[in-house]
Amino acid sequence: KEQRTPENGREPTAYIIVLVNTKIKRPFVDFDVGAAVENILLGAISFGIGTCWMAAINYKKIRELFEIPEHYDLKQVISLGYPDEESVMETYKDSFTYWKDSDGKMHVPKRELDDVIFKVY
């Protein structure tokens, strides 16, 4: 399994950095951020734009690069672009590392629904 990042010329077209102004006190702000990000993802996908809700990011470097003032809490980063490869979901087995096979398909590990849904009867 080969771990990779986008080659030159295949990087995302755009990024959205989600910030929260900490000078404005709002209860449940994390829920609002989650709902907003999910709506952005769904809206983009409806137009054929690929998305990635990024988790492995360097918050400190982003803050420095974009000179984000300290009173803004950097909450999330979304990448956007037009997919040029096919993705195949794989059952999660010890790693969330993506890999590309010899046919050019991107394999994306995902947990089974039964592993993430809690049922109470």
Image (spheres, rainbow, N blue to C red):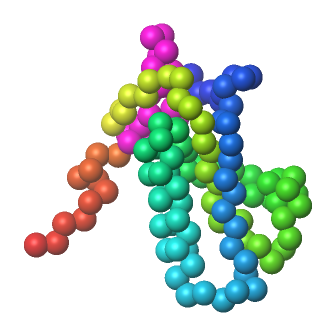
Residue 55 at x, y percent in the picture: 60, 52
Is residue 93 visible in this depiction of the protein? no
Q: Is residue 15 left or right of residue 67?
A: left
Find the residue positioned furthest to the front. Answer: 47
The count of marks equals 0
Q: Residue at x 26, y 60 (%)?
A: 117
Residue 39 at x, y percent in the picture: 47, 59
Residue 66 at x, y percent in the picture: 85, 56
Please say whether residue 112 is one of the residues in the magenta stretch. Answer: no
Residue 108 at x, y percent in the picture: 44, 34
Q: Work out whether residue 32 or residue 120 is closer to the camera in this orientation and state it.
A: 32
Q: Work out whether residue 46 or residue 93 is closer to the camera in this orientation and state it.
A: 46
**Quadrant of the image occupied by residue 77:** bottom right
Q: Residue at x 60, y 36 (%)?
A: 81
Q: Is residue 89 left or right of residue 4?
A: left
The vertical placement of 46 against 26, above or below, is: above
The vertical placement of 57 against 1, above or below, is: below
The vertical placement of 41 against 63, above or below, is: above
Find the residue positioned furthest to the left. Answer: 121
Q: Residue at x 49, y 15 (%)?
A: 104
Q: Residue at x 80, y 77 (%)?
A: 71
Is residue 87 visible in this depiction of the protein? yes
Q: Work out whether residue 13 or residue 103 is closer to the camera in this orientation and state it.
A: 13
**Quadrant of the image occupied by residue 25:** bottom right
Identify the magenta region: 92-110
Magenta stretch: helix, strand or loop mostly: loop
Q: Is residue 31 left or right of residue 24?
A: left
Q: Quadrant of the C terminus?
A: bottom left
